[in-house]
Image (tube, rainbow, N blue to C red):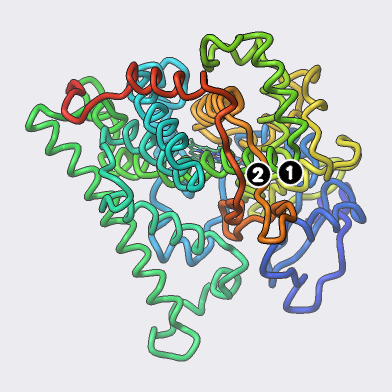
Amino acid sequence: VFWRSTTTSTFPGPRPIPLIGNILPAQRVEKVLSALGEKYGPIYALKFFRTPVLVLNSASVARDLLELRSSKYANRPLPKIVEMSSFNRGIVMEHDPARLRLGRKVIHAIGQSRGIEEYRARIQHYLATYLKRMHDNPRTFMQHARSLVASTTLEMSHGYEIQGEDDPLLSDARTLVENFSHASDAGGYLVNWIPFLSIFPEWLPGMQFKTRAYEWGRQYNMVSQKAYDWVKREMVKGTARPSMVAKALDETTRDAIPEDVIMYSAVQVYTGGADTTSSTICGFILMMVRHPDVGRKAQAEIDHVIGRDRLPTYADRDKLPYTNAILSEVLRVIPPISATLREPSEDDVYDGRYIAKETMIIENIWGMLRDRDVYPDPDKFDPERWVDFDGRHVHHPLNIVFGFGRRSCPGRVFAEEMAFTVVALILSLYDISNDCDASGKPIIPAMEQTTGSIMFPLPFTCKITPRDLRASEHVEKFYATYYQAPGSVNAV
Ligand code: HEM
């Protein structure tokens, strides 16, 4: 204590109310945290009840702490409600370093380009299905984006093929994401700040959160187990398709990884990957409706580099800098995850100031991506910013939206590939424009997102029309080439 008080000072921040701490709104916290950052700087202190909190509002500070001191900042705080609902099982909230390492290793089997390659034919199949649906029914573009990513992630994690929108596993997985989103809303439950509340019985007024948390936990365990058992049964029958679970249960690694680590890691491919990646695709369409000039410029680039005789592929990414810049700028202005949490496993000092062990660290991703010192006019959607910008730079949006250091997103490679491919295909095939209301006035959708730990653009309408006759021919050809009829896929 003597050392602390003589050599270090504390971080600036708004004065907390005694006993309660600082009060933040229940929704759109990231915006309030950014506004406070403008007053108190790139790293500042708050207090929630007795918990000390540090907010990181700058990517450089996040890199200094979470990347350059990654072993010290590899933990996430564990809110009581998350523990009560069993969501601490699985990579996202894992506390045990050995289990975390194994869980991330399981996911890495599909998180790297080589791993993704094994699913190439299936990814093409789902892209073909997506394009056909977009072509036949462009009005439901949001649903098509969600189905595309849901199908691909469940295929890669479990080798499972979704049977339409009513598929029982898909609807269980969607409920699970919703429950997780509620449970991980740290500010939403008093018990996260006053943990002893959890000892009171469920029938007392105000204790209903306990019933809810146990129900979420029951559902999480049930879905994870059901999906995992399904793969094991398929393996016994000899009909299992290539998947992350099948690979992890392979003879060579069978004894090395505990079964529950495989089971929960697999289900988190869907929970971590599906809504985030489809939110990005819908965010792209939203920005194209709002900025038709940007879409036209990208189409000119695609036509010039690729021509109209074939469709762009992921392999063309480096040749399409403007199209690629659109993806970066979409993720900068509407990142699917606005903030995540960490905590240091030991005391630390940064910039001459003291950080106590188990301080709650808020990575304000939304705020970092609107840092006025780095991005002039940060609310402006301007892909041009990224055309000549070094992709390795700490302030490049793609180095921020997936987080930092040891807990950064293991699905980044897949997410970038899927999102870029869809952006390039859609721009090459379709014009995206605004709808009009009954009086003929253009409807320009607002940049509003759902609340919760994964944000999705609110439903909006637009027109998605084929650019020319060649677009229809390309979609038909793509479908004929890549669509795989049920039952035609080989087992492992
Ligand atoms: C555009 C799409 C995506 C975005 C923006 C995104 C963003 C993030 C962020 C910000 C984190 C927290 C990082 C941190 O704490 O520093 C994270 C973690 C995670 N993501 Fe993603 N993600 C995306 C797609 C995916 C995909 C496709 C998968 C699955 C293959 C996935 C699986 C995970 C998992 C399991 C974690 C927890 C990692 C850990 O705690 O160690 N994500 N993601």
Measure how far apart labels 1 and 2 are at the Cα level.
6 Å
Residue 447 appears in the rendering: no
The N terminus sits in image quarter: bottom right
In the rendered image, residue 388, in percent from the top left (x then y), is placed at: 80, 17
Residue at (29% x, 46% y) in the render: 164
Disc 1 to disc 2: CB gap under 8 Å: yes
In the rendered image, residue 82, in percent from the top left (x then y), is placed at: 47, 61
Left/right placement of residue 71 relative to residue 481 reads: right
In the rendered image, residue 191, in percent from the top left (x then y), is placed at: 54, 74
The amino acid type, in three-letter code, at marker 2 is: Leu
Residue at (77% x, 32% y) in the render: 293
User: For the residue labelled by badge 1, is the local secondary structure a helix, a strand or a loop?
Assistant: helix
User: For the residue labelled by badge 2, is the local secondary structure a helix, a strand or a loop?
Assistant: helix
In the rendered image, residue 44, in percent from the top left (x then y), is placed at: 83, 53
Q: Depth check: 243 or 281 in front? A: 281
Q: Which residue is mark 1?
A: 290
Compared to 331, does 78 lie above or below?
below
Q: Depth check: 444 or 318 in front? A: 444
Left/right placement of residue 234 relative to residue 166 reads: left
